[in-house]
Image (cartoon, rainbow, N blue to C red):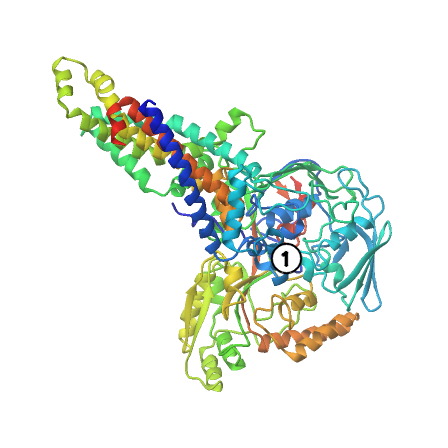
């Protein structure tokens, strides 16, 4: 079987195998947290008997290992279970809770990526071309400053300036199934802007570094001697060889956009998967937590695999390095 | 990635208290006649995908106002002047020394799906919280009820094991809404159907609840709004900004640190509603050193409540006097002396206890009450001057109410109060009360509690409760720092009349009672 296909197969199998220890670690870690769904949902109103009744109904009084095995048995058959918030007459399957929110997160990630990735790579090429000039220094310091600020700080500053003071954008990114596409795009303008500022620095600087290291090779000097323009050298000769490290950074940042944007989601009240996971942990709603953990793990695995494939496509020598 | 900005979802602790008039920030208090029409958007500080239609899990502002106050009705409600009135009930009467209560329902009541609301639905709603298999924390509210049955289609009779003159008040508890009953006599929780002023258009837990006016509502002229949307925004900055940009017309639980800035904005006003909510440091009176009454008094004189209200609550509250009955409640009695900061008296009490110094651990977290940690730090400083060393133990927010409260001996607590003194004492200070975290066991107090319940003559009840309050003030384990206000931000486009201070958001009925300007 050709090597790339074999690589995909091996990586996929390994990736799926990773899901088992991930789900186990998270399950047991959550069980170590103080309290459980019964105590958290009743909060200060809890009485010992109402807590005991709740636990009995949800099966929380059985040992941890037994509960994990039960969950696992259902999960491998594709049944992610029901949220603990289900009650008689109102069953809440986990897939239903997560489904729409996951799509929202993908939408936000997709729009952000389509803005940020071309911007970051483009700027990276620009400053590699004009390295050590004032453009280079300016962009470097600006993006470093952005990445040094916590996301919520950036979010609040943008919210204050662009929404409250100048009234250009909505401060609430509350969308639901019925929102049309144009309204959606308008509503998520500020979160997209915040996230773009956050992830651009990493990708831009990696692009610059990768290109500069390529530019020191002899064949680039040969291209210059041949009289090619700097932009042609950059785009046609240097960039194709620089993709490997660049796509790896892009994959990392795209995974972050799916998995790590809970702070921005909360700041703009955007109904995404990050907030779902945090609420589920706070409420100790284990089926939802497990499902989110699996989704996050799969996201990382898929993006990393895609990045490696692209890298190999541009530089087949890397295939043997894995 | 920092998660400190996400405020913990404050669980409303089944609170009812008495009401009070509302104070506005510099604008006239009374608005004009209510006008029909309009679409109000209400932002709440909680609401997540773990919410459900089952009222036993209704923990907060979102479920209380959207589901409890807008979608559903209770048998009774508490009006802004703290009196109890029938909501679904037309009239109610107690007999046999308040051991039997008969409620007559209003005629022609219907649910949003057209089904008639009869006594059977009420019985099913109550039974949901009674019996050995219920998971409901409201079981304590109905603890004395031995039987509830429907005498006919419009009459519900409660039979109790002991006197309870306050039962009508307790039935307004937001855990007890009336929803349709199924054929087997249990509550139908499959769809958001109630009898309330608004009909649910769409809602998924964690998302906004969009509702429209119920044309068949049983109260004439109400509600005034045509449409209302409740939006859960847990982050306080996002909630405040949404109010400032006009995306919402109301935000509850504002951050007191930003109030001064907000008050300068001409399009919104800050609403402060005095309530029965109070913040306290509770001592376990059965464990040394707190089991010595002189030690308790030493600590009560070692705290400067005024400084804490000024510096931590920024003036948004009134100092407590270790009596958990709020001033606005019926039967509140003054209990002199007002505890003030007096290090000398504190040292004197320590000496009487046979000690020259005292060292105690105080457990607090941000979840204890807003500003708990700062208040504890001030307390530590103040007590040091009286020779008392307070060691602050910072507990994690997560699991505070299950691992710290009622387990440790000196903790910070946020209480929501209750509508009546009897109910308050039965749940917080009576001998076997589930929430008696001070483990208060006073024979005379418990004796008076039963006496107060059996007495239906108000003139005779007042001195009973006055004596109980004095006992709590003198010998209890509560150090009540302050009674807090509910602090909300209201757009100028939204108007209101008299506002209740029992629950937040006008006793959760703001959708029914407010109107657009």
Element at label 1: helix
**Is B280 placed above or below B500 here?**
below
Residue A118 image-quadrant placement:
top left
Residue found at x 25% / y 31%: A321
**Is A289 placed above or below A194 here?**
below
Quadrant including the N terminus of chain B: top left
Quadrant including the C terminus of chain B: top right
Is B63 situated left or right of A198 in this image? right
Residue found at x 74% / y 42%: B222
User: In the rendered image, is residue B121 in sight?
Assistant: yes
Is B510 situated left or right of B255 in this image? right
Looking at the picture, how far across and down is residue B139, in whole percent?
A: 69, 60
Q: Nearer the viewer, residue B264 or B320?
A: B320
User: In the rendered image, is residue A168 in sight?
Assistant: no
Residue A246 image-quadrant placement:
top left
Q: Nearer the viewer, residue A45 or A281?
A: A281
Quickly name the residue at label 1. A53
| Neighbour tally class for label 1: few under 14, some 14-19, many 20 plus, Cα within 10 Å | some
Disc tally is 1
Q: Nearer the viewer, residue A67 or A274?
A: A67
Residue found at x 29% / y 25%: A312
Looking at the picture, how far across and down is residue A110, in whole percent?
A: 43, 28
- Residue sticking out furthest to the front: A1
Looking at the picture, how far across and down is residue A93, in whole percent?
A: 59, 40
Is A77 situated left or right of A214 in this image? right
Looking at the picture, how far across and down is residue B327, in whole percent?
A: 63, 65
Return the chain for callout 1: A
**Is B290 placed above or below A169 here?**
below
Q: Nearer the viewer, residue A262 or B196?
A: A262
Residue B473 image-quadrant placement:
bottom right
């Amino acid at each position: 079987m050709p090597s790339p296909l074999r690589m995909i197969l091996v990586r996929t199998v390994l990736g799926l195998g990773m899901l088992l220890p991930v789900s186990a670690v998270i399950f047991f870690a959550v069980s170590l947290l103080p309290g459980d769904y019964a105590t958290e949902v009743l909060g200060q109103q809890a009485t010992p008997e109402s807590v005991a009744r709740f636990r009995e109904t949800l099966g929380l009084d059985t040992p941890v290992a037994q509960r994990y095995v039960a969950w696992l048995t259902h999960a491998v058959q594709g049944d992610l279970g029901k949220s603990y918030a289900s009650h008689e007459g109102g069953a809440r399957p986990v897939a239903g809770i997560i489904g729409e929110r996951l799509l929202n997160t993908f939408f936000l990630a997709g729009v952000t990526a389509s803005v940020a990735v071309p911007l970051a790579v483009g700027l990276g090429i620009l400053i590699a071309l004009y390295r050590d000039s004032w453009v280079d220094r300016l962009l470097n310091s600006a993006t470093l400053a952005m990445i040094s600020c916590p996301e919520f700080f950036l979010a609040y500053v943008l919210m204050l300036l662009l929404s409250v003071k100048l009234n250009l954008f909505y401060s609430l990114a509350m969308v639901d199934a019925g929102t049309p596409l144009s309204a959606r795009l308008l509503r998520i303008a500020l979160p997209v802007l915040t996230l773009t500022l956050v992830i651009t620095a990493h990708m831009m600087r990696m692009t610059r570094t990768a290109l500069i290291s390529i530019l020191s090779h002899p064949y680039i000097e040969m291209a210059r001697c041949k009289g090619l323009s700097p932009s042609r050298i950059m785009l046609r000769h240097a960039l194709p060889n620089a993709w490997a490290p660049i796509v790896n950074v892009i994959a990392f940042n795209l995974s972050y956009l799916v998995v790590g944007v809970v702070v921005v989601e909360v700041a703009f009240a955007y109904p995404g998967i990050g907030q779902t996971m945090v609420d589920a942990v706070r409420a100790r709603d284990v089926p939802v937590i497990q499902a989110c953990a699996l989704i996050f793990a799969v996201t990382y695995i898929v993006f990393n695999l895609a990045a490696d494939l692209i890298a190999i496509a541009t530089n087949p020598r890397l295939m043997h390095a894995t | 990635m920092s998660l400190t900005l996400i405020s913990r979802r404050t669980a409303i602790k089944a609170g009812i208290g008495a009401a009070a008039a509302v104070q506005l920030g510099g604008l006239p208090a009374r608005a004009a006649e209510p006008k029909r029409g309009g679409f109000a958007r209400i932002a709440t500080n909680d609401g997540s995908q773990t919410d459900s239609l089952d009222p036993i899990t209704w923990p907060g502002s979102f479920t209380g106002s959207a589901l409890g106050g807008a979608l559903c009705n209770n048998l009774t409600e508490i009006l802004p002047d703290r009196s109890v009135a029938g909501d679904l009930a037309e009239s109610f009467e107690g007999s046999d020394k308040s051991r039997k209560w008969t409620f007559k329902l209003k005629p022609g009541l219907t649910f949003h799906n057209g089904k008639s609301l009869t006594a059977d639905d009420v019985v099913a709603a109550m039974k949901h919280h009674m019996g050995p298999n219920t998971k409901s924390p409201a079981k304590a509210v109905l603890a004395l009820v031995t039987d509830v049955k429907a005498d006919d289609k419009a009459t519900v009779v409660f039979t109790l094991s002991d006197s309870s003159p306050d039962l009508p008040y307790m039935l307004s508890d937001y855990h007890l809404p009336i929803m349709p009953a199924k054929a087997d006599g249990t509550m139908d929780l499959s769809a958001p159907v109630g009898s309330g002023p608004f009909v649910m258009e769409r809602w998924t837990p964690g998302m906004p609840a969009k509702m429209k006016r119920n044309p068949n509502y049983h109260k004439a002229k109400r509600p005034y709004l045509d449409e209302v949307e409740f939006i859960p925004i847990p982050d306080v900055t996002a909630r405040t900004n949404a109010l400032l940009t006009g995306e919402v017309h109301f935000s509850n639980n504002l951050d007191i640190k930003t109030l001064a800035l907000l008050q300068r904005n001409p399009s919104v006003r800050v609403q402060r509603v005095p309530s029965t909510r109070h913040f306290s440091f509770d001592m376990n009176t059965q464990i040394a050193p707190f089991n010595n009454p002189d030690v308790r008094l030493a600590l009560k004189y070692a705290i400067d409540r005024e400084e804490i209200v000024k510096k931590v609550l920024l003036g948004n509250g009134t100092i407590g006097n270790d009596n958990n009955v709020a001033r606005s409640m019926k039967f509140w009695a003054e209990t002199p002396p007002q505890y003030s900061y007096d290090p000398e008296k504190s040292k004197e009490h320590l000496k009487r206890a046979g000690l020259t110094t005292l060292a105690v651990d105080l457990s607090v977290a941000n979840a204890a009450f807003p500003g708990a940690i700062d208040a504890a730090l001030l307390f530590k400083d103040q007590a040091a001057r009286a020779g008392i060393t307070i060691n602050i133990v910072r507990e994690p927010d997560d699991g505070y109410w299950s691992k710290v409260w009622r387990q440790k001996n000196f903790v910070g607590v946020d209480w929501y109060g209750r509508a009546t003194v009897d109910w308050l004492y039965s749940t917080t200070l009576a001998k076997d009360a589930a929430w008696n975290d001070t483990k208060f066991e006073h024979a005379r107090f418990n004796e008076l509690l039963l006496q107060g319940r059996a007495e239906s003559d108000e003139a005779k009840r007042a001195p009973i409760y006055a004596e109980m309050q004095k006992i709590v003030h003198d010998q209890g384990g509560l150090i009540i720092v302050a009674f807090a206000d509910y602090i909300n931000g209201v757009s100028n486009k939204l108007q209101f009349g008299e506002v209740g201070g029992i629950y937040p958001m006008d006793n959760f009925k703001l959708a029914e009672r407010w109107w657009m300007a």
